[in-house]
Amino acid sequence: MEQKTKINAEPGKQELVITREFDLPLELLFKAYVEPEIVEQWMGTKVLKLENKKHGSWQFETSDAQGNVVFQANGVIHEFVPNRKITRTFEMENAPFDVQLEFLEFEKLTDDTSKLNMHIVYRSVALRDQLLKLPFAQGINMAHDRLQDIVSKLR
Amino acid sequence: MNLRRDVFQAIADPTRRAILLLVASQSMTAGAIASNFDTARPTVSKHLQILTECELLEQVQNGREIHYHLNPQKIKEIADFVEPFREMWGDRFNKLEAVMKKYKSKK
């Protein structure tokens, strides 16, 4: 089966490309990146600021059920061309990862389908690999936690 | 801290990637592998040592010779490591699609 979301991360390079085809008209796909209340819904984060213009900036924040802030990210927008392109930086606050540069390109396929091409450039190869491995490591931790749960119930 | 070699560090080096491609077609001795490179023999030995330490290569005694084999299991682990990252983005985009479809029908 062909995967809808594709990741291209060549070894030894400090960049990666994420592509995805959507069952949505181009305008709706672009809107999902622009309207704060929509971004909040699919990103699962609070949008504190989102200035969709050249030299604008953005700020996201996620809290857990107890109201503790668990994730903060911010960046600036370098280029904003409606229904075509967003160039922006992304930085996670209080994390040992440097800022990354993101090129988002939106493309119309048919009247009802569209494509997103996300090109991310990291400061170094090592940093890119570390971030790529993050969900992998979290997956292992989760599997480990589940194992611990099962084992503790057996006792 | 760095007790065990990181497999990703191992494949970040172009010579080591070339060695893996070479051994993928057939198992070879260190000498046969080194003859494919302009690099000094001890340098190739060092690369082989690193690849063996992180289990990408396996040594098999064949009479008086030691042959290097590719360990397909370890290679598969590398191929699979990006999968959780892909799934994370896939889930996020699925959600985006669902949210926008609802948005469209509301209008």
Image (tube, coloured by chain):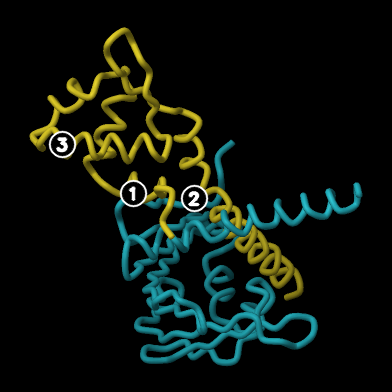
What's the colour of chain A in the image?
A: cyan
| Residue corresponding to mark 1 | A11
Instruction: Please state, as top left, top right, bottom left or bottom right, where the N terminus of chain B lies in the image.
Output: bottom left
The kind of secondary structure element at disc 3 is helix
The x, y position of residue A142, in whole percent, is 70, 56
- Mark 2 in CB contact with mark 3 (< 8 angstroms): no
Q: A14 or A139: which is nearer to us? A: A139
Give the amino acid at mark 2.
Lys
Q: Is residue A14 above or below residue A55?
A: above
- Mark 1 in CB contact with mark 2 (< 8 angstroms): no
The structure residue drawn at horizontal position 31% and vertical position 66%, both measured from the top left corner, is: A124
**Position of residue A12 in the picture relative to residue A104 (left or right):** left
**Position of residue B37 in the picture relative to residue A109 (left or right):** left
The kind of secondary structure element at disc 1 is loop
Q: Is residue A92 above or below residue A22?
A: below
Q: Which chain is yellow?
A: B
Circles 1 and 3 on the same chain = no
Disc 1 versus disc 3: distance between alpha carbons? 25 Å
The kind of secondary structure element at disc 2 is strand
Give the amino acid at mark 3.
Pro
Circles 2 and 3 on the same chain = no
Circles 1 and 2 on the same chain = yes
